[in-house]
Amino acid sequence: MTLRWKEALFAGAIAIAADAAIAAPVLAEQKVLRVGMGADISGLDPHRASLTTDKGPIGWMFNALVRFAPGSADPKDIEPDLAESWTGSDNGTEWTFKLRKDVKFHGDWGVLTADDVVYSLNRAKDPKRSTFASAYSAFKTIEAVDPLTVRIELEHPVPGFLGLVANYHGGNIVSKKAAEAKGADFAKAPIGTGPFRFVEYVTQQHAIFLKHEGYFRGAPKIDRIEYRFIPSETSRELAFSSGELDLTWGRREQRWIERWNKREGSIIDVYQPGEYRTIHLNTTMAPLNDRRVREAVAHAINVDEIVTFIGKDVGPKGCSVVPTGYLGEDCSAGEYAYDLKKAKALLTEAGFANGVTIKSVVSNSNAQLPVMQVIQGQLAKAGIKLDMQVVDHPTYQELSRKDASGMIFYGAARFPVADTFLSEFFHSSAIVGTPTAITNFSHCAVADKQIDAARSEGDPKKQMAYWVEAQRLIHQEVCAVPLFNLMQVFLRSDKLDYGYKLTGALNLVPPITELTDLKK
């Protein structure tokens, strides 16, 4: 999402309240959960939002046909959500979902019907309305059989299909009436069925959410969530220490975790999924348009040293462009071994015996800048000067999508199937400037045939073979250098009880459910 879009979305907004309602005053007896994040939200449309700061609240406001059990990011833990049951055909191309009765939307937007589900999933597959449209390209028809039954027909079997209709990205279900009535303003006043409803946004300050009294699983124990934007890490930590925050974004550094684990009254949560950190190389920008230069970069980066710097518990090493643990990950292509002698020889062979300079737009976030500074030092030893333009994170996102960088350091967590990463980052349809591009960091087009074939292959063994070959070709082309998984880290008060065991959260921010409680 570009800054221009964001500015248009929230232009002139001092306080934007859903349905013109102003957030209710805080009452003494209310349980108020105060959450500190490092950046402002960019929009709360579930079919558009991809930033961590957006995805957390979206998980509190929306449901899907099925859901990952709270505290889990494991597909084996998918369970009923808005659908109370479902069936799939033997060949995996037809799915039928039976919806719960009398599920209420926030405010006065009525109850959920099959029409809302049909509308939402068609919206999710529409590139003009969804960031995640490419993931739904195999959805042939989505129809309402009756007011509480939805049938989905696929062009071909889809790996991890239930993940596409789960409470993540395009799977979230919106109110058809509200979305049509609000149009582009839906991102400013979202309407879902989740345990919390949006009521107020103040730019660069906070967003307010109140409990949804009519939530189908029961009214939440938390009355109000104050989602505060505090860019300074030090300020967030001071606010937590003084009791002004109950939950806050933590530093993903081993020493920081160990220090806070010793503090009385605090709990550190380290959980999946790791945001897979990768260096994407712009194969169209000189000197990286020469594969030998890209290979030199790969051999000049010491991943083991980076992992030591981050901490093995926080940043375990990866081995492929497909993240560790994803279905389809394959490491048979091997690593780019750290080898300065080889890196220098490759540069000389490419005609750059005196070294090269590579431009890189770098975010000033604590999850990116320190690592890029380490990489900058490593590359310098091989004669590769990394010219870093350090900017705030939204500007980094905007400039990256304008193809202004030769080297992009990026981290992402997706549904754990190889197709999601290969399609979004290493398919020609994801290259900067294409209408189907999602993140616009990739310039890779060597494995389209294998990625496309795997997407429609019903035989798991053949599908895996396609994924293996795709990873081999991408490795050979040196489209990217895999680094490590950066685990999620949050700091919370010991008075905050999630109501579940937190081992994973696909939306990255801890889920706040009807069971979450604040002890006195």
Image: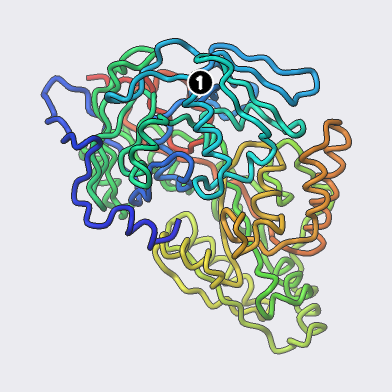
Please say if 445 is above or below 110. Answer: below
Residue 340 location (% of width, % of height): 74, 72
Question: In front: 414, or 498?
Answer: 414
Question: In front: 175, or 64?
Answer: 175
Q: List the residue tagged with mark 1.
A: 114
Direction from residue 195 to residue 138 in the image, left or right: right
Q: Residue at coordinates 66% horizontally, 58% vertically from top-left?
A: 303
Q: Residue at coordinates 70% horizontally, 37% vertically from top-left?
A: 138
Tell me which amino acid carries mark 1: Ala
Mark yes or no: residue 253 visible.
yes
Q: Residue at coordinates 12% horizontally, 31% vertically from top-left?
A: 25
Please say if 48 is above or below 507. Answer: below
Residue 81 location (% of width, % of height): 50, 18
Mark yes or no: residue 60 visible.
no
Residue 503 location (% of width, % of height): 53, 28
Q: Which coloring applies here? A: rainbow
